[in-house]
Image: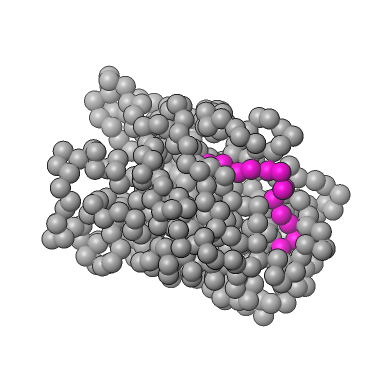
Amino acid sequence: MDHDADEIAEAVLETYDSLSAKYKPVKATEDFFQWVSLSGVVAVREDVHEPKCVSLGTGMKCLPINQVAEANGSILHDWHAEIVALRAFNHFLLRECLDLAHAPTKTSPIIRRRAVSEVSESNGLQPFSIHDDLQLHMYSSEAPCGDASMELLMEAQVDATPWPIDQLHPATKKLPGLLRGRESFAELGIVRRKPGADLATLSKSCSDKLALKQCTSVLSSCTSLLVNPANAYFESIILPKSQYVQDACERSFGPEGRLKPMARHRWTGGYAFRPFEVRSTNREFTYSRRSKPASSRELRTSNVAAVFNPYVQEALILGRLQGRQKLDPKGASAICSKRMWATTIQVLAALGTPQLLQQISGSPRVRDWKDSRLFADRRRVKADVTAEALSGWIRNEGDDFEIAAG
């Protein structure tokens, strides 16, 4: 299945266009034009020619490190478009799993039940798998922040001289060893934190997170309990031609770039090094910064992050539902960690999966779950990648919370 990059991009752009104004930047005026980044996950099956956008997200911000502990699983740590789209995709998978768990005769266009012969300690205990004939792609309206966008950043500078260390942002000086996304841009192939935050953050750049996904799959931790990772890898990432720099993409994501050491690993549990192809499209997003009309004097960023999949549409501000106070439990997005873990528990309970449930030892806290035997394969993959390819990766810890069925 070799689908045109423009077709994949168009699937995301058309889905976004269908959303109401609530989920979009305000209309352009003479004073300003608001822009935002857009990403979407597209699924393609062999028997269905038309690519289908199954999730999308917009957004450009992340949570400062001094607010992580109080998030309590209910506030997103990172709402850059790529991450929102990935979380929305995982939410979609969880809801599909829940539907199948409650209706044994039902089928899903994206996942299937695994045969008893497929389930084992070495191949993974997950009850579901993405269909064997289904491909996953991602479209993004901007180059991922971090390593894949460094050449673009250099081109945009009036003076391309790298900033000296004494001119680095104060947040960087508080977290030595992990540069913000736009600092010291002559340093290539390294792990970076998200750019733009006035306060220190440990959220890694989208380039680094997508690079890691080539080994851990597109599945989040909770989804990986239910869906086997073997078929859960991107085939390609689609970028506008203006955002595609071949050298940067090959360095950041390619099999001969910084991830080259991963080719020698043979992991268990369905995990593998599956580098995606980066392709370019002629399509441009209506609300990209390159779409600013000449009649608008100023370019501004939108503070609204949109979430879409077939089960949910949300508008977020600062990682929570628009219009809700910071610590209001009702402000928790459907794609926040606490609610996605709650859905995972619902699926496990509906399935009655003793092999999985017995390994948790009754602990209600998410950190204990992630440290359990259930995630041993996933932990090994992440450990190998961060030790050999993405060195400098620092875990964004502090948000531990109790898991309860939703």
Q: Which residue is at a point 66% across and 29% down the rendered structure image?
A: 50
Of the 4 image quadrants, the one containing the C terminus is bottom right
Q: Is residue 189 left or right of residue 379?
A: left
Viewer-proximal residue among 134 and 298: 134
Q: Is residue 221 above or below residue 197?
A: below
Residue 119 visible in the picture:
yes
Q: Is residue 165 above or below residue 140?
A: below
Let me know if residue 277 is in the magenta part.
no
Viewer-proximal residue among 364 and 101: 101
Q: Which residue is at a point 72% across and 48% down the rendered structure image?
A: 132
Q: Which residue is at a point 28% across and 59% down the rendered structure image?
A: 179
Name the quadrant containing residue 160.
top left
Residue 333 visible in the picture:
no
Location of residue 70 in the rendering, given as x and y in whole percent from the top left corner = 43, 66
Residue lying furthest bottom = 361
Q: Which residue is at a point 68% across and 30% down the rendered structure image?
A: 49
Which secondary structure type mostly characterizes the magenta part of the structure? strand
Location of residue 341 in the rendering, given as x and y in whole percent from the top left corner = 61, 62
Q: Is residue 301 left or right of residue 54?
A: left
Magenta range: 126-138
Q: Is residue 303 above or below residue 51?
A: below
Location of residue 339 in the rendering, given as x and y in whole percent from the top left corner = 59, 58
